[in-house]
Amino acid sequence: MPIPLDTLFFAGALGLVAIGVVGMLASRHLFRVLLCLGLAEAGGNLLLVLSGYRWDSVAPILTGDLPVGVSMVDPVPQALVLTSIVIGVGMEALAVALLIRIRRAYGTLDGHALLARLREDLDERLGVAPDRSEDLPKGHAPFPAPAAKEQEVNP
């Protein structure tokens, strides 16, 4: 029994969203995160278009010579997707510009390395010594020596 075409399209759209979300969560490189965001966005747009599509309908712009009672595809999801594409392209262009600035300023797009560099910059600008360990007391004074236990003398 063949799988219906609409089921394949929905599965593909959900697959794009899933790949994008997993890629955003798994990647440390900020440009890869941005690419995965674009994949998730494309999957969401495809889901939105599929939600308004009817397989036995005609496009809403075709209004001439149609018999009465012919159903049309809902144009609202299509308009929303067009708006989403325009907003998405603008946001991705802004994100790429910011990534270029970050790369020039810090020399990396690795998330962990960038976070460490940002913390160092903040500590330097605030004039605060960075914490080296959660276990050391503030001021880097040594811990007091543990008190010696008195041993009982057995006769």
Image (cartoon, helix red, strand yellow):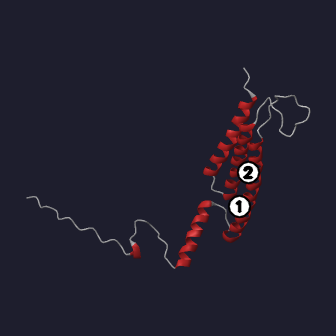
Assign the N terminus to one quadrant of the image: top right
Numbered mark located on residue 84 in the image = 2
Q: Secondary structure at mark 2?
A: helix
Q: Relative to residue 25, is residue 127 depicted above or below?
A: below
Q: Relative to residue 116, is residue 129 depicted above or below?
A: below
For marks 1 and 2, give the CA distance: 16 Å
- Are the residues at dot 1 and dot 2 in contact (C-beta closer than 8 Å)? no
Q: Nearer the viewer, mark 1 or mark 2?
A: 2
- Picture residue at 37% right of the left edge, 75% below the top: 141
Residue position for label 1: 95
Q: Residues within 10 Å of mark 2 (few under 14, many from 20)?
A: some
Q: Quadrant of residue 18?
A: top right
Residue 137: x, y in percent?
38, 71
Q: Secondary structure at mark 1?
A: helix
Amino acid of disc 1: Ala
Amino acid of disc 2: Ser
Q: Residues within 10 Å of mark 1 (few under 14, many from 20)?
A: some
Assign the C terminus to one quadrant of the image: bottom left
